[in-house]
Amino acid sequence: MTAPVRLEKAKLLQLDADLRNEINADKTAELQFNPESLKVAFANQIQTPPGAGDQSGTPSRQFVGAGTTKLTLVAYFDASAAGVDDVRTLTQKVAYFITPEQQGNNYIPPAVRFVWGSFQFDGIMDGLEENLELFSSEGRPLRASINLSMSQQRITLFAMRSTGGAPSTPGTRPLTQAPAGATLQGLAAQAGSGGNWQAIASANGIENPRQLAPGQLLDLNLSTGPRGR
């Protein structure tokens, strides 16, 4: 049997104030499920000089300041898949990066580095919206999605991070929800990946593929090779 495919997980790491060195490793937040996509936007500060509208022809425009680079993504969390009874146990690790800390006389959020495989983005988290989407009978939130945005006050080139050897296979957003009584083997077969169910179980952290929690989110979109005999 071939070794299980290693699923590279997206992470948030704290940086020092200069956005260079990784610090406070205990604050690292590994996303439970990888994002479906990443959106990077670039913007320059442009303005039309005063009085330009009085001239004939197209008014000139001037670059008046540093540009910005912005990253936005959506992260998903499922309490049942992690074996906890409140999904906020997982999401509070992400919320740490938007919580201001005192630095001298000012309060600013910690610098953060988003890493997923060879993709790296350094900046400040300037927006976080958490949606609690499913509650237990006791009123505990069980699933959540987080829309987060990070920005840096300059136009930056893409940082290519070394993955340290052969590239791993990134997953995609786990849109498959396990119905009551479903097995991982059956769901994998329906997705056309029946021969790779063991690698999928390993990547999703599933110990018993015959006992899935109803509604559990699964990533069945792994690109794996054929299973060994």
Image (cartoon, helix red, strand yellow):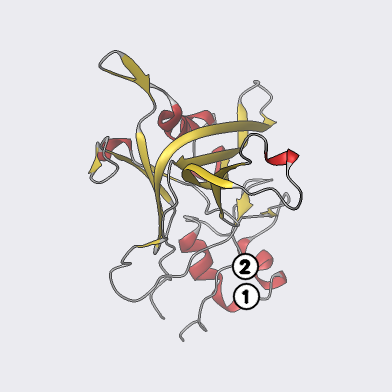
Above-or-below relation of 184 to 43: below
Q: Using the image as rendered, state which of residue 54 and residue 194 is in the foreground.
A: 54
Above-or-below relation of 26 to 229: above
Residue 176 is left or right of residue 101, and the answer is: right
Label 1 sits on residue: 194
Query: Which comes before the other along the chain, label 1 or label 2?
Result: 2
Q: Using the image as rendered, state which of residue 218 and residue 91 is in the foreground.
A: 91
Q: Which residue sits at x=65%, y=60%?
A: 183
Q: Outermost residue, bottom direction?
A: 229
The numbered dot on residue 144 is none
Please, what is the three-letter code of the amino acid marked with disc 2? Gln
Q: How far across and how far down the image is residue 227, in percent?
A: 50, 82
Residue 182, image quadrant: bottom right
Element type at mark 1 = helix
Q: How far across and how far down the image is residue 146, in percent?
A: 58, 38
The numbered dot on residue 185 is 2
Q: How far across and how far down the image is residue 78, in percent?
A: 57, 41
Q: Which residue sits at x=35%, y=31%?
A: 110
